Amino acid sequence: MNTADVLAITAEDLAITRLGERGVDTPLGELLGGREDTVHYVTETDRVLLDDTLGVAVRREPGRALPAFNPGGPRAKLYFEPTGVTAAIVTCGGLCPGLNNVVRGLVLQLANAYGVKSILGFRNGFLGLAQDSEPLVLTPDNVRDIHKRGGTILGTSRGDQDPAVMIDTLRRHEVHMLFVVGGDGTLRGAQKLADEALARGIDLAVVGIPKTIDNDIPWIDQSFGFQTAFARAAESIAAAHTEAGSTLGGVGLVKLMGRHSGFIAAYATLANHDVDFTLIPEVPFSAEGLLACLHARVQRQGHAVVVVAEGAGQDLLPPSAETDASGNARLGDIGALLRQRITGHFARTGTPLSLRYVDPGYAIRSVPANAFDAVYCTRLAQAAVHAGMAGFTSMVVARWHGRFIHLPIALATASRNQVDPHGDLWLSVLEATGQPRQF
Ligand SMILES: Nc1ncnc2c1ncn2[C@@H]1O[C@H](COP(=O)(O)OP(=O)(O)O)[C@@H](O)[C@H]1O
Ligand SMILES: O=P(O)(O)OC[C@H]1O[C@](O)(COP(=O)(O)O)[C@@H](O)[C@@H]1O
Ligand SMILES: [Mg+2]
């Protein structure tokens, strides 16, 4: 996010929709006692400031309320009577480490903390809601070990479904609270569900949990699964580096996922600190410039490692209007293009080359969550249940500057989180690789 993006946000943009007044005492009352003196205590008026930089805050219009998030966490008064609630869970979009941890976290929090007796898992993403296939009945018992596995026990899908039909399904199952686990596309779908319910006067809380290895959801410190994914990507870079360093004219070329945002490539680069060139969608490059720099680096160092995010350099490939079922762009293969261009260049200049091409592909997102993501998934799930019980809707739980918050889905889907070419992350990558700012 750059300063202009942050300054464009107003207090009104961060308001969260509520289904109605809250009158039910929380069963967590005992846990809340004594929290009043902590900075994390949540009252109705408590807020987490958007700006954590004084310079940004003072540039705002004087007299206007500072934009601030509704904080995550348990409320003393609930909207729903927990023992009468039916909750449902759906997982959508591409796989991501931690999906099963979130499903398990939601079930344990709903059943154990709040005493919810009816929890349904709809299968295969929004498709399962549209087709009204029989949902799984989820209990603490049958989710006991699922966090040890990658993927999602509920299944997932891409592709648009009719919100009216999905709401009909939720009505038939008398669902009060829907937890939607997914990325930007999923959240757009979730917003339509929440709008449809509101328009039809249906009491349904729709709460999102931000999933994506691409980390492309804005106003969120990090999406869950991202850390596990880039850690796995770093292993592929290490392999390419070892290969490149052990051969004459060794070049390791590693292609990583990242459709429009280069966070996986950037973080995996920094995790290894032995990458020579990192290419991301946010920073255009000239192939000739890259080849000249790569040639020089191999001559000087004996070997080099290039990391390329799949969405990088798309302007170097034939344009395509193809999309997947969800409307996401189908990308050209930048890895294959670079492989061919590097091979051609080294052959033409009579320079020895041993090119090792590594594409870990789906391997970085199909693994179980690491310990950090496992903790994060549990805490996001707990925050999501607190929000649903309090009757908040059209929102996604998130962490902003280390605090759990409620983010309006409208804001989460209004823009895309991308690596800022002028920001400190990209500066770190440039420092670590020693590559030029522009090829
Ligand atoms: N604009 C939209 N309106 C309604 N549903 C959408 C929209 N965009 C995506 N979806 C649905 O959300 C689900 C997941 O979207 P997708 O883009 O594949 O993954 P992700 O949520 O991980 O970004 C799919 O079923 C897709 O059809
Ligand atoms: O082959 P698929 O399932 O369409 O997934 C490929 C895409 O999914 C991702 O892993 C993440 O996408 P989403 O989080 O938006 O689902 C991208 O990095 C990648 O381009
Ligand atoms: Mg997406």
Image (cartoon, rainbow, N blue to C red):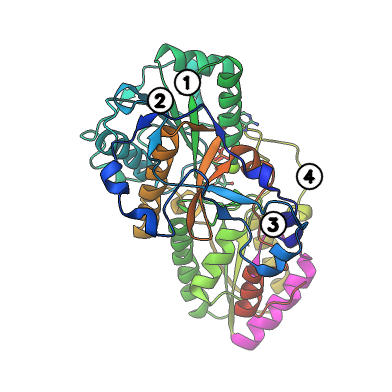
| Most distant residue in the bottom direction | 300
Query: 136 or 76: which is nearer to us?
Result: 76
**Residue behind mark 2:** 122
Between discs 2 and 1, the one toward the N terminus: 2
Q: Residue furthest left?
A: 141
User: Label 2, label 1: how many angstroms apart (C-alpha)?
Assistant: 6 Å
Q: Is mark 2 within 8 Å of ligand 1?
A: no
Image: 109 above or below 222: above
Instruction: Characterize the local packing of mark 3: few (<14), some (14-19) or many (20 or more) Cα atoms within 10 angstroms.
Output: many
Which mark, residue 319? Answer: 4
Residues drawn in magenta = 277-301
Seen at 78% across and 56% down, the residue is 61
User: What's the distance in space between the residues labelled 4 and 1, CA to CA?
Assistant: 35 Å
| Mark in the foreground, 3 or 1 | 1
Q: Which mark is residue 1?
A: none
Q: Horizontal and vertical percent for residue 438? A: 77, 72
The secondary element bearing badge 2 is classed as loop
Q: Which residue is mark 1?
A: 129
Q: Please give the residue where the numbered disc 3 appears in the rendered image.
A: 281
Q: Is residue 348 visible?
A: no
Q: Quadrant of the C terminus?
A: bottom right
Q: Marks 1 and 2: in contact by CB < 8 Å?
A: yes
Q: Residues within 10 Å of mark 1 (few under 14, many from 20)?
A: many
| Image-quarter location of ligand 2 | top right
